[in-house]
Amino acid sequence: MKVMVLVKATSDSEAGVMPTEAMLTEMGQFNEELVNAGIMLAGEGLHPSSKGARVQFSGKNRTVTDGPFTETKELVAGFWIWQVQSMADAIAWVKRSPFQDGEVEIRPVFADEDLGEAFTPELREQENRLRVEMERQS
């Protein structure tokens, strides 16, 4: 099962406060455990929402709003993509993380079989081609 682990923003992350060397060391050690266990597929921190933008869709209209955005607790400050056995496994790993405050959200990533009949063989082939190309480009 693939999951996305969303690290929620805090007032510090939104203010652009960078982690200390000690925090980076702890997170690096945790990430190393995840990699060594074959769980971590990707992970990155995000700049504050003041450096971002949102695009709202309404039919053919597109409205762009520059950050910062309100409701810090609803924003994301970073993420991981993990391959785990179950949601319980993901939760157990998150509990081991070095975070001292804040919130982390875990969401399953759709697998091909979750998409049902609408995900035709042609669409599956296209998706597989794109995955191969993305891997080649990285």
Image (spheres, rainbow, N blue to C red):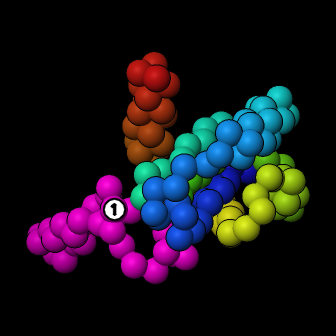
Number of labels in the image equals 1
Residue toward you, 1 or 29: 29
Q: Position of residue 38 (x, y in %)?
A: 79, 33
Instruction: Relative to 21, say whether 134 is above or below.
Output: above
Report the amino acid beneath label 1.
Answer: Ser
- For image coordinates 62% across by 60% down, the residue present is 7
Please identify the residue farthest to the left as the structure is shown: 61
Residue toward you, 1 or 64: 64
Report whether 33 appears left or right of 7: right
Whether residue 40 is visible to the viewer of this picture, yes or no, is: no
Q: Position of residue 49 (x, y in %)?
A: 38, 62
Instruction: Relative to 136, say whether 18 is above or below.
Output: below
Q: Position of residue 135 (x, y in %)?
A: 49, 25
Instruction: Relative to 25, say whether 5 is above or below.
Output: below
- For image coordinates 48% across by 51% down, the residue present is 46
Residue toward you, 129 or 89: 89
Is label 1 in a helix, a strand or a loop? helix
Q: Which residues are magenta?
A: 49-75
Report whether 101 appears left or right of 15: right
- For image coordinates 71% across by 46% down, the residue present is 23
Q: Position of residue 4 (x, y in %)?
A: 63, 54
Q: Which residue is mark 1?
A: 50
Instruction: Relative to 6, say whether 79 is above or below.
Output: above
Instruction: Using a 10 Å C-alpha cutoff, classify the residue at mark 1 as few (fewer than 14 neighbours), some (14 to 19) or many (20 or more).
Output: few
Report whether 61 appears left or right of 116: left
- For image coordinates 54% across by 64% down, the residue present is 12
Whether residue 23 is visible to the viewer of this picture, yes or no, is: yes
In the rendered structure, does residue 8 fall within the stretch colored magenta? Answer: no
